[in-house]
Image (spheres, rainbow, N blue to C red):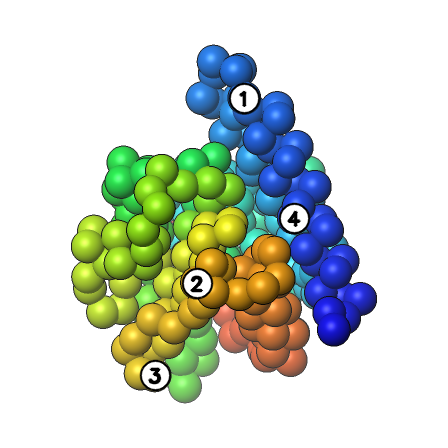
Amino acid sequence: MATKHFDYICDRIAAAHSKANALAKGLGHPGLAGEITELALAECIRPFLTHSFHCGTGKVIDTGQRISDQIDLVIYHRKSVPPILVSPELGLFPIESVRYAFEIKSKITASEIKDSLKKFRSIRRLKAQAIGAARQPVSGNWNPTNVIFAFNSDIAGSEIERYVKYDPATPPLCTVLCVLQKGYWAFAGVKDNWYGIESAKEKAKYVEFASFITGLMNSLAADEALAYPFCPGAYVNIDSA
């Protein structure tokens, strides 16, 4: 029997899926349709964020003045360094604060996968800064969990098999793929392999989204207990002014 939490999660995404499809249908404006789906997903995710984490949209930056492409949805924390917010949800997010980066698609296609990989590649080029053993700033790689989330698909076959054709690297640029009523997959770095579920094999509708939210909540809850050694003043860099 499904739990109340499971029903709550599935009810939220079912309503968002229906609303996104209804509003996007016949608009004739891909940009507006995209914004609708982004808002719909953010509203589904926000209730499951833990205390330190927030949702936003914008670009990711580092202390070397590098900047990513526009990212549909960012889950970030404010423990170490705040973002530069233009509005309550739009801003520039220091790479050290970004936990998840989403590309959200009304309908996933081969072209949309390629577009997402371009965006994630721009994040991968950024360098995070931490405090080393000698209390001196050191640069390194911090890769947020990159997610492709789609409300619909243009194929009937396996989504993960199609994705791997475009990104066969280990680790891949995207490490979580969720397509409503198709499936949910995550890349396990320990075993260097994808695992997940195909929705068609499950009885419960939107079980793939419930699985995704479970993984999200587990990750954020674990991160709440971690310290993020970082010197946010590096973004101001007064010496270079």
Which label belongs to residue 39? none
Q: Which residue is mark 2?
A: 198
Which label belongs to residue 190? 3
Which label belongs to residue 25? 1
Which label belongs to residue 13? 4
Please state which amino acid type lies under the numbered disc 1.
Answer: Lys
Q: Which mark's residue is nearer the viewer, 4 or 2?
A: 2
**Crowdedness near tag 2: few (<14), some (14–19) or many (≥20) residues, C-alpha within 10 Å:** some
User: Which sits earlier in the primary sequence, circle 4 or circle 1?
Assistant: 4
Percent x, y for residue 233? 52, 58
Helix, strand or loop status at disc 3: loop
Instruction: Determine the residue positioned at 61% across, 24% down.
Output: 23
Q: What is the CA distance from the residue labelled 3 to the residue labelled 2? A: 22 Å
Instruction: Determine the residue positioned at 57% across, 30% down.
Output: 21
Please state which amino acid type lies under the numbered disc 3.
Answer: Val
Helix, strand or loop status at disc 4: helix
Q: What is the CA distance from the residue labelled 4 to the residue labelled 1? A: 18 Å
Please state which amino acid type lies under the numbered disc 2.
Answer: Glu
Q: What is the CA distance from the residue labelled 4 to the residue labelled 2? A: 17 Å
User: Which sits earlier in the primary sequence, circle 1 or circle 2?
Assistant: 1
Q: Which mark's residue is nearer the viewer, 1 or 3?
A: 1
User: Which sits earlier in the primary sequence, circle 4 or circle 2?
Assistant: 4
Q: Quadrant of residue 176?
A: bottom left
**Crowdedness near tag 4: few (<14), some (14–19) or many (≥20) residues, C-alpha within 10 Å:** many
Q: What is the CA distance from the residue labelled 4 to the residue labelled 3? A: 30 Å
**Crowdedness near tag 1: few (<14), some (14–19) or many (≥20) residues, C-alpha within 10 Å:** few
